[in-house]
Image (spheres, rainbow, N blue to C red):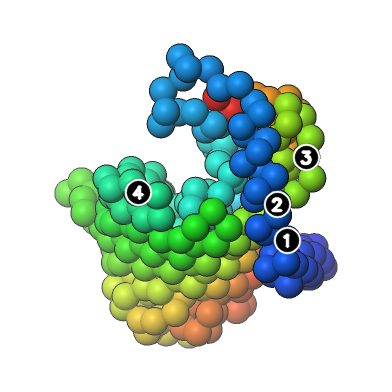
Amino acid sequence: MTALKRSTFALISAILATLTLSLAGTSTTALAQRVQAQDDVEQDSRVPGWLRNRPLGLTWGYYTSYEGSGELIASIGLASDYSSAMSAASALQSLSSIDIPVLSLRNLKVGLSGNLLAPIAGSGPKLGLDALDPSLSAGIWGSAGIESIAVDAKILGKVWSPEVFLNAREGYEAQIGLTIYSPMMRLGGGRFVDLSVRGDLTLADDSYMDQHFGISEAEALTSGLDAYSAPAGLKSAGLSIGTAVPLTRNFELQGAVGLVQLLDGAAASPWVQERGEATDIWGNFGFAFRF
């Protein structure tokens, strides 16, 4: 697993460096070609504007069961849109949520976010530590940029959990990310292979950090780990790549791979250091119909 993570990190870093260096010289020409290709493709007027050129499909992949665990689980998700930096910012973010746009302009999008924080059992790397119950989180997000590059930001925090959940997941998380997009070679139906690369930083408040990475005196006795209080601040850094490969005008293959590196107080947690992994990887592959 360690060798795989190192190989994945090296591959992502190499592609990111190559894409960044070549973007300035090639993005204008490639984007002009893309616009021309879109003009060449006859659009179905019966498709609503908000749905046109958007994908509908499923992906299958492996994701970390919870941050720092080092355990990958299979999961099914919705296909993502890699057709521009503005849209790919959401598709590749490591702070997952359902994002609903409220304001949608050409170079600016703002909206609401929501997520169900799944339970974390007191087993595996967290054996002997308190189990965490699920809760609902909500917040706001925004993305600003152009077709080839965009910056996005999001903040999410707990808004509700049933009273029967005595140890519901608490606290706030915030993330800021940078996404670079470039169309590559032209394939099926006159469309281009879309490639997006994204880096992000995630912060968390003291409630979140101490609940997820801290170890109380009582937990220290049952787990055999040293007591630890995790401070607020930087929690993790993420790097990811996503691509859509058109087979025809409407059908495409999708794929993404990424890693998340725990930082500072999260990486220093005794249970992460002794039982889990400070570096988590994820990846998916899928098939979609693009309207």
63 vs 176, nearest the viewer = 176
Of callouts 3 and 1, which one flags the residue occurring earlier in the amino acid sequence?
A: 1
Residue 5 in the image: state x and y as whole percent. Answer: 75, 66
Kindly state the secondary structure of the residue where label 3 is placed: strand
Report if the CB atoms under discs 3 and 1 are less than 8 Å apart: no
Q: Which residue is mark 4?
A: 105
Q: CA distance from mark 3 to mark 4?
A: 28 Å
Q: Which residue is mark 1?
A: 26
- Dot 4 alpha-carbon crowd within 10 angstroms: few under 14, some 14 to 19, many 20 or more: few
Q: Quadrant of the C terminus?
A: top right
Residue at 42% from the left image edge and 67% from the top image edge: 175
Mark 2: amino acid? Ala
Q: Is residue 94 above or below residue 220?
A: above
Kindly state the secondary structure of the residue where label 1 is placed: helix
Of callouts 1 and 4, which one flags the residue occurring earlier in the amino acid sequence?
A: 1
- Dot 2 alpha-carbon crowd within 10 angstroms: few under 14, some 14 to 19, many 20 or more: some
Report if the CB atoms under discs 1 and 4 are less than 8 Å apart: no
Residue 180 in view: yes
